[in-house]
Image: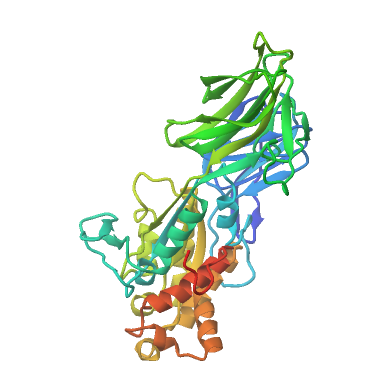
Amino acid sequence: MPIVTVQPRKQATGEIVSEFVDSVGPSATTWTYPTPQNHIYVRNEGTADITVTVGLHVKVIKPGKSWSDTLTFTSLKINAATRSQPFVLRTIQYERPTIASFGDTQAPAGYSSTVLLVSLNNPFEYTGVAFIGDSITAGYGGTGYTNTSAGGDMIFGNYWYVNTNGYCWSNETGKYLVTKYNRDFIVPVTHERIIFTNPQFSNSGYTSGNPTNTRAIGRKIATLPNIGAGDKVSCTYYGDHFGVYFSYGPDRGIVEIYVDGNLVQTVDTYASAATYKQLISITGLPMAQHEVEIRETNRKNASASQNAVIVEGFVIQKVVKAWNRGTAGVDSRWLAHQALNVLPAGELITHAIVQVGTNDRIKISSTQETTLNVLEIVEKLRSANIKPILMSSIPAGTTNEEQYSIHMEDIDNAIAAAAKILGIDYISNYHGFLDYCDLKGVTIESYLPDKLHPGDAGYTVMLNHILYRLGQARKRDGATW
């Protein structure tokens, strides 16, 4: 398929090294680029869904809709429900900008700190979150803190350990996300990630106000005519199990369930009387991304009067993992070199929450270097297809601050500058902590036992602020659940 190379042009954020544009219909085609691209834009100009696959990122684009994101990749694949869906594909390689000042410059495809919320609420998408940064990310000062082999997890080398169990904002945020989202979700047949080649939706007769209702699990059902082999229902997800709800009855046929192209179960939906919410569970799969297909067979039970099959919905496993990889004593310069090394080996990371800078007051002479280091951290993470969420740390005690010429408000401003250049927002724990203490009428030092690191109460203040900024509903005071 032809790909048009567009001449590089100057942008406010730096030089476009290469830009490729294509606009013909896909045919299960893979595009390969000579250099790593770091921005993608796809618009579906056809009448059926198209699916774009970039590494482990899978995006279904509805007709007339578009998708834009910042990823690093050298190849991608576009499949279509039919072979003639017109689309526009544009990929761009941006050179890292040369930063002369911290003005209103913005990079393309910015996103907000709620980018994690979007991933968490998509049951088809794996979410792996790493918290990286210094001692206030690691949890120094909280109950149970340790960075030794006795209670820590080695990062790399012979002595870099992280605090895996102590009380701190990172461990508690990770526990919250895993507890709330790492579970099975019931997904309706109308979800955009469920792809029907020949959809026929109708109302199910579901009544939410009737607790004894025996009808389908949702308000909509999908009928597969099952009169010609080839039509199917499909989706991709990450996990090791899933389920499909069917309606059985005397006029129901037979379908086959395939996983990654392999037949795993034949489902005969015939029954002498209509029955609903019949769950077929598929278990024992490798923990990985899978393509699931329900294929029509044009077959039925000998006793069945028709071939049609009714799908009520899916049970999709949402997988969420979280790791505290904070490392005591490090500054932004160190993390700029080690951002990928501190991540858990062999694990898939999709998002990284970065809080660093407290030690820059000691080891770095200019906040401009802090900004540049943060940009380098983001660049490294994005090179591994990891979405970064930037944070600044909390204020320090006055006796701690008076030792240095750079202070925590300067670090907050430096991280704000990096976020502005990148075209993203950031979570200011500096402002959140300061505002909390002002509104409560208490001193900052009352939450910092050593005048720098929070105790448990201080980490709780941080936890609640971070959950709020991540779009999460924290528990109320006095909760026992």
Residue occupying image coordinates x 53% and y 78%: 432
Q: Would residue 32 be found to the left or right of residue 133 on screen?
A: right
Query: Residue 132 or 458: which is nearer the viewer?
Result: 458
Q: Is residue 255 above or below residue 62?
A: above
Report the front residue among 160 and 287. 287
Q: Is residue 411 left or right of residue 87?
A: left
Q: Can the viewer see residue 94?
A: no
Give the image's coloring scheme: rainbow
Q: Position of residue 29 (x, y in %)?
A: 61, 27
Image coordinates of residue 156 in percent, x first then y, are 27, 54
Q: Point out residue 434 in the picture as x, y percentages from the top left corner.
A: 51, 83
Residue that extends furthest to the front in the rendered view of this protein: 212
Judge whether 354 appears above or below 215 on screen: below
Q: Quadrant of the N terminus?
A: top right
Q: Quadrant of residue 469?
A: bottom right
Residue 311 visible in the current orientation: yes
Q: Residue at x 38, y 69 (%)?
A: 168
Q: Is residue 171 above or below residue 72?
A: below
In the rendered image, the residue lying farthest to the top is 302
Q: How many marks?
A: 0
Residue 355, image x, y percentages = 44, 68
Q: Residue at x 52, y 68 (%)?
A: 475
Q: Residue at x 22, y 63 (%)?
A: 148
Q: Is residue 88 above or below residue 322?
A: above
